[in-house]
Image: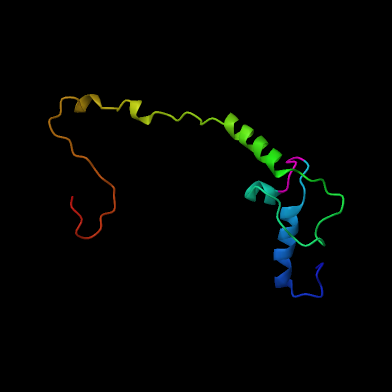
């Protein structure tokens, strides 16, 4: 492992923090900035000296514009489906309905 001098249980949080602060070219931001809306503050040992800086206000404006473009997907109307009734049962006076639900003690029918 890369942290041979430490116990292995202490290394993952630091590694994950470094991953969250890594600048992603396709996102033009780090994942930490996307989640919290501002850059995470860490010690200077984790950051590269030449990493590009993204202004938080510009990122927030761009994120708001993208969110405004999203629209909900229309849902299906299940209530408009017709119910099948067999020809032999069209003139029936009584119908027995089967309910396959689990009933607990002292529950009304």
Is residue 81 at least partly visible in the picture?
no
* Quarter in which the N terminus is drawn: bottom right
Furthest residue in direction right, as rendered? 50
Left or right, 49 with reference to 41: right
Residue 19 versus residue 78 in the image, above or below = below
Residue 37 versus residue 83 in the image, above or below = below
Left or right, 107 with reference to 78: left
Say which residue appears at 73% left-offset and 44% top-offset.
29
Residue 105 location, x and y as percent? 22, 60
In front of the other: 50 or 89: 50
Rendered image quadrant of residue 94: top left
Residue 15 location, x and y as percent? 74, 62
Start-end of magenta stretch: 26-30
Say which residue appears at 19% left-offset and 59% top-offset.
106
Find out whether residue 58 is within the magenta segment.
no
Say which residue appears at 43% left-offset and 29% top-offset.
76
Is residue 74 at least partly visible in the picture?
yes
């Amino acid at each position: 492992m890369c942290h041979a001098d430490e116990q292995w249980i202490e290394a993952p949080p630091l590694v994950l923090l470094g991953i969250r602060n890594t600048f992603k070219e396709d996102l033009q931001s780090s994942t930490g900035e996307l989640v919290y809306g501002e850059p995470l503050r860490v010690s200077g040992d984790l950051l590269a000296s030449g990493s590009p800086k993204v202004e938080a206000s510009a990122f927030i404006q761009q994120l708001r514009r993208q969110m405004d473009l999203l629209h909900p997907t229309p849902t299906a109307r299940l209530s408009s489906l017709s119910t099948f009734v067999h020809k032999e049962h069209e003139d029936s006076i009584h119908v027995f309905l089967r309910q396959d639900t689990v009933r607990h003690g002292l529950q009304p029918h």
